Image (cartoon, rainbow, N blue to C red):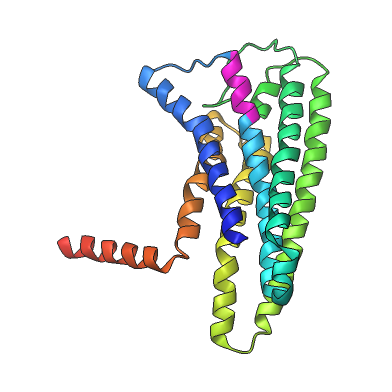
């Protein structure tokens, strides 16, 4: 099941980084900041869809690690192939509808503060700044409800890892503890990277906001996690670690 979820995570990371980076690179090469209205709508939809699906998938993966460490004898029963398919399909399907509602709600607002987004891609907070309609409160309520849902997922992840660490510390052999930690630490690293960058992007005080800082923060949460996730999970592969170590050793020897 872990490799099935990793496949889904890889597809999400590829889609997330392809939503913003190619367009920004093309604009840099042409020395422009233009994007069509339809292109902006698609960027918002896919960014919300892919990033939210990844978060819910990471929550599901924390449950997978909990069952693998705390209830190993029930692993095949609780996380069979059909259950994994249902969990993944629920994450993709529910978040698709959520992203559709979010995008439709955002772009139904009249934009009367110009059409210049202070960002290298379209995102909901920047678009809301362009609206002078009171209807934006409707979108704010949707954001509040989304935040509550994300907090529930966060609490679920924290509780899962508290139970995991309690179970690991009760393992008598050091080798057993090391193996158990090795199976869950990559996932914990990915979750921490994803949540820390997203929280800093959206929850930081407005007093420390500036165009240059907004750009750096947006790169942190929209580009860095999808780019680093494959590296974090790949380092679990012994052959890849051996090849990487051999390549680094060869580079130092050439110098």
Residue 98 drawn in magenta: no
Q: Please tell me whether the stretch drawn in magenta is mainly helix, strand or loop.
A: helix
Most extreme residue toward the front is 82
Residue 43 drawn in magenta: yes
Q: Classify residue 46 by image quadrant.
A: top right
Most extreme residue toward the bottom is 172
Q: Position of residue 48 (x, y in %)?
A: 66, 34
> In the rendered image, which quarter contains the N terminus?
bottom right
On screen, residue 220 versus residue 67, left or right, reads left
Is residue 255 something that shows in the picture? Answer: no
Foreground pick, 203 / 32: 32
Most extreme residue toward the left is 254
Q: Where is residue 59 in the image (x, y as percent from the top left)?
A: 70, 54
Q: Where is residue 68 in the image (x, y as percent from the top left)?
A: 67, 70
Q: Where is residue 102 in the image (x, y as percent from the top left)?
A: 74, 28
Foreground pick, 122 / 181: 181
Seen at 52% across and 30% down, the residue is 20
Look at the image and give the residue range highlighted in magenta: 37-45
Seen at 75% across and 47% down, the residue is 150
Asked if residue 43 is positioned above or below residue 183 in the image, the reply reads above
Foreground pick, 74 / 121: 74
> In the rendered image, which quarter contains the C terminus?
bottom left
Is residue 85 something that shows in the picture? Answer: yes
């Amino acid at each position: 099941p872990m490799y099935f979820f990793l496949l889904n995570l890889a597809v999400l990371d590829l889609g997330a980084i392809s939503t913003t980076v190619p367009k920004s690179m093309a604009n840099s090469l042409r020395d422009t900041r233009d994007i069509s209205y339809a292109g902006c709508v698609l960027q918002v939809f896919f960014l919300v869809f892919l990033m939210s699906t990844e978060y819910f998938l990471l929550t599901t993966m924390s449950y997978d690690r909990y069952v693998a460490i705390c209830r190993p004898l029930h692993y095949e029963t609780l996380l069979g192939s059909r259950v994994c398919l249902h969990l993944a399909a629920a994450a993709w399907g529910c978040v698709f509808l959520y992203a559709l509602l979010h995008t439709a709600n955002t772009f139904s607002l009249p934009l009367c503060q110009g059409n210049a987004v202070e960002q290298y891609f379209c995102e909901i907070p920047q678009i809301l700044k362009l609206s002078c309609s009171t209807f934006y409160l409707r979108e704010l309520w949707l954001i509040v409800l989304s935040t509550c849902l994300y907090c529930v997922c966060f609490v679920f992840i924290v509780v899962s890892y508290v139970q995991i660490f309690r179970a690991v510390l009760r393992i008598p052999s050091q080798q057993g503890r090391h193996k158990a930690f090795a199976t869950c630490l990559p996932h914990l690293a990915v979750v921490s990277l994803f949540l820390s960058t997203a929280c800093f992007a959206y929850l930081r005080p407005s007093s420390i906001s500036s165009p240059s800082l907004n750009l750096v923060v947006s790169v942190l949460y929209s580009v860095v996690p999808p780019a680093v996730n494959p590296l974090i999970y790949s380092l679990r592969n012994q052959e890849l670690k051996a090849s990487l170590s051999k390549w680094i050793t060869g580079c130092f020897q050439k110098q």
